[in-house]
Structures are given as structure tokens and as C-alpha cells.
Image: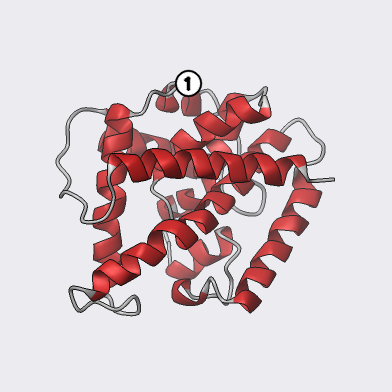
Amino acid sequence: MAGVVIHLAVADKAAEMLDIKNIPLFFAGNIAPDCIHARADYEREMKRHTHFKDGIRDWDFLASENLEIFHRRLDEFAHKYCLEGEDRELYTGYLSHLLTDELFARKIRSECVVKAEEYGISQTDREFFGFMMRELNWSDAFAAENYSFRNNPVETLRKAFGCEVRDYISAEEIISSTDWIYQNFFAGNRYYEPALLMNPEKIYDFIESAADKIKDFVKNIS
């Protein structure tokens, strides 16, 4: 699970590589799976559903049988929503979020598991969530302050207000989440504990790698 500002930075980079026409919709799609947190009766299983991980635990996600299920769900979604329609770039953004999270699990979360074990924390422990959030929050804060966005992330998201991801995320949840992103990362300086693993080089490398992964996947949808 990459942080929300990292998702927006990846969207900013991928939009250029894919020649996205409706950038606000693409940006909205790129935050949409996490907008489930804004739901009034939010439960963890809801997030598994918006991330195509029904029945899959985070620590088992990279098992070959679970990746096969996940990739099949990606393909089904892509062929249902991303090939045609005025809002297809919203759904392409949604896919982009999930592809970015997969890469994050492979490249970053796996390193965090090793680092956390140095502190006696297993990825199945409740404390691991807090360990990961320290890495995510610092990375998001760094990207918000230092990444050179071509498209202002908050202003771009606000241009998409009113859109919804059918069967997954409402327009109100996207609006509420955009406000949360602004208040937590773009409204002024806010202190987050320094990361133990993440650093600027890792962040920039991850953004580039995720954008490349999205470009390759989207261009092979047919």
C-alpha cells in the first residue's frame, strides 16, 4: 500500500507517459481505492474489496496463487471499464493505484518486513501497521514538499469532483478524501516521524518504476 501522495506522484508521471487527456479523472482514479476510508461504517474488509483482495491477507498477497487471483481480477476490471466510455480514464487511474500497490508490496513492503524484524516486529503483529505508517507518512510528506508535480494534485482532484467509481467508491468519498489529503499534506508543514527505511532516492526510484509498470500494463489492454 503506497501512500496517497506517492500515488498522486505516480499518477502525475504516468499521465504524461500515457498521454492521458482527462487528467482530473485519472488522478481521482488513482486515489479512489483508498477513499473507502471515508465511508461512515468503514471496516477493513471494505478496503480488501476496493483493492481486489477479497479473501487475501496482506502478508500472503505475494503468494503465487494469490497474485494469480489478483491479476485475474485486474484483467476483468480492465476489460469491463477501461476500453471505452467517457470515464475510462477514471477506471484506468483506479487500475494504476492497484498496480502501484502491487509494486510497493514487492519492492518496499518486503524490505519493511525485514527491517521491522530487527525490532522484533512480525508483519502479522498489530505493531507492524504502525511501523508501515511511519514509512508511508514520512514518504508522503517528503513527496508533497519536494516532488515536482506537473499538475497540482489537489487542484486537479477538485476538478474531478462529482465523479464516482461505480460499485466501489462514491463521489462524496472522493471529495472527503481530497480534503483529507489537502489538510494532512498540502495545507502547511506538519511533522511526521523520520522513516527508518525510506529515503529520497527510494521514493523517486519507486515513482519512476511504478509509472513504467502502469504504462506497460495499460498499453497491453486489448
Examine the rendered structure and indicate whether residue 153 appears above or below residue 98. Answer: above
Could you tell whether 83 is left or right of 71 in the image?
Answer: right
Task: Say how many tags the image has.
Answer: 1
Q: Secondary structure at mark 1?
A: loop
Residue 149 occupies quadrant? top left
The residue positioned farthest toward the right in the image shown: 222
Q: Nearer the viewer, residue 38 or 145?
A: 145
Residue drawn at x 56%, y 76% as measured from the top left = 63
Examine the rendered structure and indicate whether residue 165 appears above or below residue 102. Answer: above
In the picture, which quadrant includes the C terminus? top right
Examine the rendered structure and indicate whether residue 160 appears above or below residue 170. Answer: above
Q: Nearer the viewer, residue 207 or 20?
A: 207
- State the image coordinates of residue 29 (x, y, percent, origin top left): 58, 40
- State the image coordinates of residue 105 (x, y, percent, origin top left): 47, 61
In the picture, which quadrant includes the N terminus? bottom left
Q: Nearer the viewer, residue 166 or 204?
A: 204
Mark 1, residue position = 151
Residue drawn at x 80%, y 50% as measured from the top left = 79
Specify whether residue 43 is in view.
yes
Residue drawn at x 58%, y 52% as measured from the top left = 99
Q: Identity of the amino acid at label 1?
A: Asn
Could you tell whether 91 is left or right of 75 in the image?
Answer: left
Residue drawn at x 53%, y 45% as measured from the top left = 32
Residue 67 occupies quadrant? bottom right
- State the image coordinates of residue 7 (x, y, percent, origin top left): 46, 42
Give the class, few, some or many, for how many residues have Cα within 10 Å of label 1's Cα (few <14, many ≥20). some
Specify whether residue 162 is in view.
no
- State the image coordinates of residue 90 (x, y, percent, origin top left): 64, 37
Visual colour scheme:
secondary structure
Could you tell whether 112 is left or right of 43 in the image?
Answer: left
